[in-house]
Amino acid sequence: MRIGELAKRTGVSVRSLRYYDKMGLLGAGRSENGYRPLPRRSRARNGPQHVPEQAERDQQPHRAPLESRRGVSLYAASKAALEQLTRCWALELARHGIRVNAVAPGPAETEALARSGLPADVIDAVKASEQAQIPRGRRGEPEDVAAWIVSLVTPESGWITGQVIRVDGGLRIA
């Protein structure tokens, strides 16, 4: 299967898949004849397209962020790759005085869910489920995450490198 067909089956744009491929993030799904087949997307009657497992999962109670699930392999692989790159680059670049850290935000009140194409009732269910699982009792705000990003570039954080800072209201430990 080629990237165009992979895009049709997954709903991920060709541009994004080419970028992921260039970064080496699709290698695990590649075979000598292209990419392994993935489940086809379904078309809801007069509604948005989505991966059935994603909508089904989003209506279930929240699961731990790093728990394995169907339908999120590329997303999970890209997250794992970024975390490992953060650690590797921190080691490789430390001798040049360069620090490398990452911020891993939890669910925040952004337009991401609205742009996902999911129906409004599913989005509301996702938000309610996430909020119920976050120990701080609410979804984050962009300012919650921005404050940590800004703090990482101050001289006071000069001793921090190779870290993935989770700004998620305690969701990771719940």
Image (cartoon, helix red, strand yellow):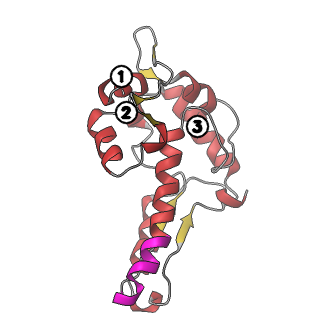
Q: Which residues are magenta?
A: 87-97
Does residue 160 appear to the left or right of 24 in the view shown?
right
Can you say which quadrant of the picture contains the N terminus? top left
Q: Tell me, yes or no, whether the highlighted magenta stretch contains residue 51.
A: no
Is residue 136 depicted above or below 98 in this figure?
Answer: above
Q: Is residue 94 magenta?
A: yes
Residue shown at the point (62%, 45%) measured from the top left = 130
Mark 3 and mark 2 lie on one chain; the one further toward the N terminus is 2
Which of these two is toward me, 99 or 23? 23
- Relative to 70, is 156 above or below? below
Report the residue marked by disc 2: 12
Q: Position of residue 147 (x, y in %)?
A: 44, 72
Q: Is residue 103 left or right of residue 174?
A: left
Quarter of the image where one finds residue 170: bottom right
Residue drawn 50% across the image and 63% down it: 83
**Taken as a whole, is the magenta stretch helix, strand or loop?**
helix
The quadrant holding residue 6 is top left
Give the structural element (helix, strand or loop) at label 1: helix
Mark 3 and mark 2: Cα distance apart in space:
21 Å
Residue underneath mark 3: 126
Which amino acid type is marked by label 1?
A: Lys
Identify the image quadrant of residue 155. bottom left
Nearest to viewer (mark 3 / mark 2): 2
Local packing at callout 1 (Cα closer than 10 Å; few below 14, some 14-19, many 20+) is some
Query: Residue at point 50% right, 84% down?
Result: 160
Q: Residue furthest right?
A: 174
Assign a secondary structure to mark 3: helix
Residue 140 disc label: none
Residue at which label 1 appears: 8
